[in-house]
Structure formats: C-alpha cells, structure tokens
Amino acid sequence: MHDTKLKKSRLTQAIGGAVLCSGLLLPGALLPLIAHAEQRAQQSAQHFEVPAGDLGNALSHFAANSGVVIYFDASLTEGKQTRGLSGDYSVEGGLRALLSGSGLSLVKETDGSYRLEERPADMELSVVEVSAERYRGVATEGTDSYTSNRVAIGKHEQSLREIPQSISVITRQRMDDQGMTSLIDAMERTTGVHTTHFGGDTATFSSRGYQMGTLLLDGSPVSGGIGYTDSSAFDTALFDRIEVLRGPTGILQGAGEPSGTINMVRKRAQREFGFNTSLTAGSWDAYRGVIDTTGALNSDGSVRGRFVAVYDDRDSFLDHVERQKTVGYGTLEIDVTDNTTVSLGAIYQSGKSTPFLGLPAYADGNLLDVSRSTFLGSTWDEKDEQLERYFIELEHAMQNGASFVLKANSLHRDTDTVQSSASTSFVDPATGTVEVWPWRHRSVIDDRSLEAIFSTPFAFLDGEGRVTLGASYQRGENKHPWSGGERFNKSVFNPDNNSEEVGFALTHREPTVDKQTGLYAQTSLEMSERTTLLMGGRLSWWKTTPGGSPEDEFKVSDEFTPYVGVIYGITPDVSTYASYTNIFQPQNDLSATGDVLEPRTGNQVELGLKGEHFDGELNWHTAIFRIDDENRAINDPEVPGASISAGKARSQGFEAEISGTLLSRWDISAGYAYTATELVRDPGNEGLSFSPETPKHSFNLWSRYRFSEMPNEGWRIGAGIKAVSGAHARRGDVVWEKGGYTLLSAQVGYRLNENLDFSLNGNNLTDKKYYSRVSGNTRNNYYGDPRNVMLTMRYSY
C-alpha cells in the first residue's frame, strides 16, 4: 500500500495549487448584447464556427457573422451556456441550435429580425415545430446535457437520425455526473456493451457477442494489446464525448468483427478563455486531480490552444494492488484561412500499477468463495506502461458546403508486465492450493495511419444528396517478447504475497506487421420529402506478416464490403430505418494443405425506430438485428489438427435507449439490450452460445434532478441502476456460471455558485458481492467492486 501521509500531502499541495490558480483569475464581465448587422437572406446555409460557452457571447458572435438582428433582454442569457456551432446552418437553424437547452424560445419578426423569449414553464413539454435544420452542434461540454443528436463517428458530421444503425453518445456531463474517469467506466454504463476485465484499468469490450478489436480516436484507428498485457484505458478527462455504434462498421474500418465501434472525441481548443479544475478523494485512498485550460493565443482567435493534465493515484479493494497514472494532452488549432484549419497535438499517458490475473476456479464448475480482497500475486508484481499519440489534421470547408479532411496519426504503446498471479491449475479441493506461474511480458505497439476524406452536397431530384469519398492506410507493428519462471504452489485461502522476486531475461521477438489499405464511398439521397436512401462500400486490402516467420504471411486483396440503408420519416420527430451490411474478417487457421483459410464473411440486417423531441433535448431509439457469420473455422473431420471454413454463427437481439431531458431539470439516460448468440453450424457444438460471457439481458439507468427554487436551489440528486442477467463459461461439458446482479448508485451535488461545484457519488450501495467475470479457465475470474464513494470539487471559469 502507499504511504497515507504522502498521499495527504499530495492532496494538500493539489488543493493549494488550485486555490492559488483560482485566486489569480480575473472575473470577466460580459456586456449585454443587442446585435445589429445588415439583414441578409435567411434561408441559405452558411458555415459557422461558434465556440461552446457563454450563450450571450455566442449569440454576439453569430450575429456578427450572419448579419441577423437579435433583440432580447440581457438577463435572459445570464449564466446560460451553449454547445456552440460547427458546420453549415441556415440562420434560423443556427439560432435554434445555439438556444437548444437554454429554456428560451425564438420568435421571428415580420422584418426578418429575431426576438428571444423565456419559454413558459407549462410549455416545457409542448411539441414544437421541427425543421431539418433544427439540431445542436456536435460538442457536448458546457451543455449540461445527457444527449447529443449529432455525431462524428461516420466520415462526416451527421445527425443520429441520418445513420440507420444503433448509436449511443456518452456526453461530457454524464461522465462528470457518474464519475467516469476511464473508458472502462464509460463502457460499463453503455447500452449493449459488455466489458471483459483483465485486472486494474485494463479490459476489452464487446457488442452483440463480438469483440471490438479496434477503437477510434477522432475517427482514426487506435489499436492495443490483448487483455492484461494491454496498456490502461484512455482517461476520459481528454474527451468531449464518446460515441458508440453497434453492429458491423466495415465501411469505417474495413476488416473486423461485426461488433461495433467506439469513437473517443477529443476536447477541442476554444476561442474563449476557459479554465476547469477538479479534485477527487474516495475509497481505497483514491486521489485525483485534473486541470483543463483553453483559449485564444492571439488577438483575433485564429490560433487557439488547449492543455489537459491529470494525476491519479489510488489503491484498490484488493490487497497490495495499486496504480498511479499521469496524463497530458495538448493541442493547437490554427486558422490558416477563413475556411482552412490545421490542428495538431499530442497525448501522453504513463503509469505504474499492480497486475492481477484474477482468481482460479474449481475443475468441476464451482467458483471460489473467498474474500474480495484476495490477491494471489506478490508485492513485487508491477506493470509499467507508456502511451504516446501524435496527430495532425487539416480541414477545409468550401462555400457550397463541401469539405476536405486530411489527417495523420502516430501511436506508440510500451507495456512491461511482471507478475506472479497467473494460476495454471484449477484449485485442489483437498489442499486449497493452485500452481502459479511467474512471468514477464513486454508489449510494444507502433501504429501509423493516414486518411483523406472529401464530402460534398449536391442537388438530387427535388431534394439534396451528399457523397463522401475517402482513402485510408494503416500500418501496425507489434512485438511481444516474454520470459517465464519456475512454477510453484500457493494457497488461495491464505496466500503468501511475499515470495522471493524472480529475475527474467526477455527473449527476442521479431515484430508482426499488419497493413490495411482502403478506398470507400458513401452517399445519401433524398428520394422524397420523407425518404432517404443510403448506399456505400469499401474496397480493402489486408496483409499480415507474422514476426519470425514471414513465410506464413497471409493477405486479402480487393475485398468489397457493401452497405445499404433506407430512412423513412413517419413524423417530423420520428423516423424508421432498415440497413444491410456485409462483413469480412481474416482468419489465420490453416487447411490440410497448409493454406490460410479464406476470411469469414456474413451480413447484418437491422431495423429500427429513432425519435427526437423538444428541440433535440430528448432522443430515443429501438432496434432489432440479426448477424449471420459464415465461413468460420471448424475442425476438419478428415484431417486432425487442420481446419475448414464451414462453420456458421448467429447473433440476434433487441436494443432500446432513451437519453436527454424528460422534464425541465430532469435528465435521464437509460438503455436495455437483449443479445442471443448461437453456433448454427459447428459439429458437436450446435445450439451452444459462441459468446457465453455475453449476458442475454442488460439494463443501465442513470437519472438526475436539479432543484431550482429556494430553499433547495443549487442542489441536485442522481440515482442509477445496473442490472445484468447471468452468464457462463464452458470447457467441454463443464460449465462455470455466474449469477445475475443488480447494482445501485447515487449522487448528491451542490453548485455553490456559477464557478464552484461539489458532488458526492456512491456505487454498489448495497455492497453486493458478485463475480463480474468468469472465464472457464484456471484464472481470469474477477469479483466486482465493493461499495465505494468519491467526493469531487470542481471549479470552472
């Protein structure tokens, strides 16, 4: 364990530094706004870049750039925030997007000017006129919202209703309210996503029964290691939001499992000065500090910067398990011209932690019943990790609404793990011991990616169309040298964590190299006032050269992945959709002749409904899907040890989600997923689940209410439920089952003034003891976190 006095000293220093910084800040006085400009045509779309932040400043910025006249009392906007704008809007559409969530309504005068009014309380639930232009900007920070109806997970910015697949958005406000500090925290609370833990801050994610192998960061791929050898998940302090698309995404990534994609979207540099800091203290000596500052670096705001720093130091409910993490993120945005912006920056994340490969189990299918604090490793176990990512992007917006994006990314991960908790036998019921195997493993991963995207609108029939063309290239290099020590026995009921430290000499390993190139096109066509047709496809080339055995190289050429969808507007607020997507996934199993099997192929069919209400403040969707996965490798019945591509699997289910504002000051995010996975053609295994760890039923709910009247003004309360059905692991005829569980969480918060906020969060309030994962192996069985609390202070300016 860490020295508690040292931790308290660090916390004291952090608080002192934050107080000193806040004392040096000069409070800004915002002038009342009556924006006057020459009136111009209101209906044509213009490109706007209005930073998120103070609503009054944003309206002033918008008026100056659009030429519109806006009348209102300055008191109406006092203390109100906006998401800002980034994209092409009509004047009225842009104003509605800026006002979204403000409680203000827009009134157009006969002379073409606009007047703002406060929306009456009894009008909060009234259905208002909906137009195609009524949507909020993409950024979610500063909006105090649990929803966003526009995302960037595609190759260009789109509304949720323009994408005929199931999508969730975890906003900045939800991350703050629920205390999500890592990507794992966020995915644990996301509809239809299953988290497979590997100890500490390391996990993999799956959706619809398949693993999400590649993540996206601002739309560019980010690969990682596997399980416990991977570096820790990204810290959420870097992100504005996290977008999750479920189902095949071949047009985005080419080859891959039909699982879905997680897109982490960075916070961007802003023109307006902003400073945020937070300090957190919680269970198991958890201490965390965050500093986030942004603003213009020259007089006209054409050069902007942002810097985020995180220090996180905490122990664990497990004996001898701890971790420390340091994160830095810096970015510059430079407006080269009025229509061209270059952004560049870097992310650095490093840390030390104690790896834990989970608990063993009994060979007959029974799980251990021991203290949740049980740790089978040694005090010298350690994982040392470092991540560096560099990026540069060029964005050019054209007058007709077209855009061109060119981006390049570089990623380096280096994770060195030394551990002695890897049990290699089941528990001996007579002695209560297992055999453990100490080893050292180093994972070094280097990725490079390039991508160019061109997107343009065009006239089509009586409506509009848009076409997007792109080319991408990705090269990944990874090597995994390792070394094992001598195995020994250890008691699971009274483990000795002070075993003698083992020295390891790593073996040399040549890197494995993966290369993937893709060309893609997608288009959307307004076939009628209510019907939109979407079509697209990707042509992919894939090559893998295994380290140390280049003769085993395998590749796929000219693989085409088509995509088609249709959206029909039932009402201005509700639409239905259908989509069909092909999949392909290379496999490295060998046939009887020694040849690599052809890739797995298949398709997904998805049908759904999407709704958007109250000026986009409330969004919901439902979806049913079926995935058929064919050409899977199965044992060759004629040649033992060889494989044939004759297997078939199926995943099907239902998903539903709602997020946003139900009533004034009452926000909600709730989602349910039903997933059934089955081996359809696999001799001896037909009817079994190919992903038994995926729960059939999962439900997540978080709701918040903010008081606005005395004596409770400034207070807020939140409550959450996570309910998961049972799951299992199988080896032959033996099954290890974990029961379903329900976890309760809550928050109490108080905003002292517009700058200072306090919150107290509690998780697993009933202190439920449960297994969060069972593996059917001699290790990798994990208890979930016991009851825990955290207190957070946030200061923003």
Image (cartoon, rainbow, N blue to C red):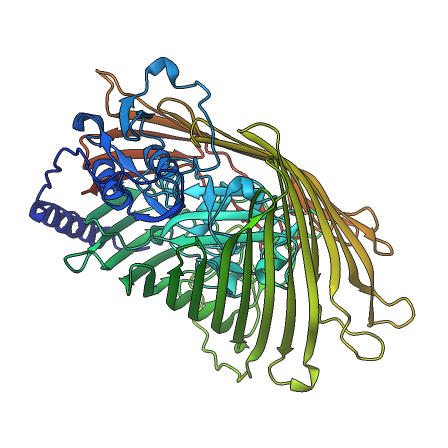
Nearer-the-camera pick, 154 or 586? 154
Quarter holding residue 597: bottom right
Q: Which residue is drawn at 21% across and 49% down?
A: 272
Query: In the picture provided, is 715 more to the left or to the right than 576?
Result: left
Query: In the picture provided, is 682 more to the left or to the right than 657?
Result: right
The N terminus lies in which quarter of the figure? bottom left
Query: In the picture provided, is 717 more to the left or to the right than 538?
Result: left
Q: Where is residue 21 in the image (x, y as percent from the top left)?
A: 12, 50
Quarter holding residue 383: bottom left
Nearer-the-camera pick, 485 or 187? 187
Q: Where is residue 22 in the image (x, y as percent from the top left)?
A: 12, 46
Residue 742 is at least partly visible in this image: no
Quarter holding residue 461: top right
Nearer-the-camera pick, 3 or 768? 768
Q: Tell me if residue 189 comes above or below residue 597 in the rendering.
A: above
Residue 25 is at least partly visible in this image: yes
Q: Residue at x 25, y 38 (%)?
A: 59
Q: Residue at x 77, y 52 (%)?
A: 649
Q: Position of residue 6 (x, y in %)?
A: 21, 55
Q: Position of residue 125 (x, y in %)?
A: 43, 19
Q: Tell me if residue 664 comes above or below residue 476 in the rendering.
A: above
Q: Which residue is drawn at 18% across and 31% down?
A: 753
Q: Which residue lies furthest to the right in this view?
A: 638
Q: Tell me if residue 245 comes above or below residue 597 in the rendering.
A: above
Query: In the picture provided, is 700 more to the left or to the right than 730?
Result: left
Q: Tell me if residue 560 comes above or below residue 440 in the rendering.
A: above
The C terminus lies in which quarter of the figure? top left
